[in-house]
Every structure is written in C-alpha cells, then in structure tokens.
Image: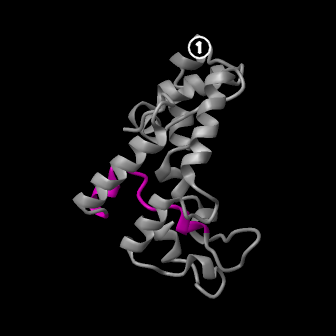
Amino acid sequence: MWHFGNVVPAENFPSLQSINIEESFERFCKGIEMFGPCWEQALEYWKMSVEEPEEILFLKFEDLKADINSQLKRIAEHLGCPFSSEEQNGGVIEDIANLCSFEHLRNLEVNKTGKLFFSQVVENNVFFRKGEVGDWMNILTPSMAEKLDQVVKHKLHGSGLTLN
C-alpha cells in the first residue's frame, strides 16, 4: 500500500496520502489498512482451506514463483479439471504459465495504458511493480524486518500457517 499510495493522486484517495515508509510500516504492523488487517483476512482463508480443502485452495506468492507448473497443476486439480498426460506433455502448463506470467500481464496494452473501470485517475500500470520474492529487503531496514518477523510470529501463532 505504501507504493500504491505514492503513485495515486492524493486528492482522489485521501486515505492513501503519501506517507513515509516508517509510518506506513507502523500502520501495517498495527493492522491499520485500507481494507482492514491483512492478518485477519489471511488467517480466515487459511482456516477455511484447512477445514474445507475441497472448497478453498490457499496459495502463496512465494510458492507460485518457486514452482509455477506444480501450482498450476494444483489449481487445475482443485477446479476438477486436471491436466491430461497429453496436455502436460504438449506444453499446455508452460503455455498457461507464460500467459499468466508477471512480465506478460505487465506488457498487455490494457495494463500499460488502461485505467480502472471505476476511476479515470488510477492507471492499471500502478498495480505492477517488480513481481519478485524478497524485494522487501530493498525497502525495509533490518530492525523493521526483525519487528515484522515478530508481528508475523505473533499473529500466526498456533494457526499452522507459515510464511517464508
């Protein structure tokens, strides 16, 4: 949200006014977010995925980035449409991975020049930053990272959910 708040016009989204990274980080740790504390949302879906795995598939960005093909297989199986041997051997999974890749989506014309349907001020390209795991290390200080580790440990304690 800190990055997003720094690229959208403040007059259109006053709640996203540009604030420094330190203040944004503190707000995040306290759960003061535009759509509520992310911990509660993530834990609610996590618990539902444990209780009803046939209904809820819980995916992590890091897992998608680490092995997109395996994750695509999981998604297809969850949807009741597993890939056939022919599809797997024919490169269908790789084709889907390429079509859904960060780079491909980022370079679609609609995401380079389009705007949100409900707003003529927020361009679609603001939703595409780097798509890399671990980029937080380029932004957060070591003390912030340590504090975030403690917040995550506290918020997820006893849930079975782990974040890398």
On screen, residue 87 versus residue 129, left or right, reads right
Name the amino acid, label 1.
Glu
In which quadrant will I find the C terminus? top left
- From the image, tell me which residue sits under label 1: 86
Residue in view at x 63 percent, y 39 percent? 44
Above or below, comparing residue 96 to residue 123 in the picture:
above
Element carrying mark 1:
helix
Please say if 14 is above or below 139.
below
* Residue sitting at x 61%, y 77%: 15
Q: Is residue 57 visible?
A: no
Q: Nearer the viewer, residue 138 or 85?
A: 138
Residue farthest right in this picture: 118
Query: Which of the pair 91/2 is nearer the observer?
Result: 2
* Residue 87: % across, % down: 59, 19
Residue 156: in magenta span:
no
The residue depicted at 42 percent of the width and 66 percent of the height is 26
Q: Position of residue 153 (x, y in %)?
A: 39, 41
In terms of image quadrants, where is residue 62? top left
Asked if 85 appears above or below 26 in the picture, the reply is above
Provide the residue span drawn in magenta. 124-139
Residue 96, horizontal then vertical, whole percent? 57, 35
Going by the picture, which residue comes out furthest to the bottom?
Answer: 11
Point 52% across, 70% down: residue:
4
Tag count:
1
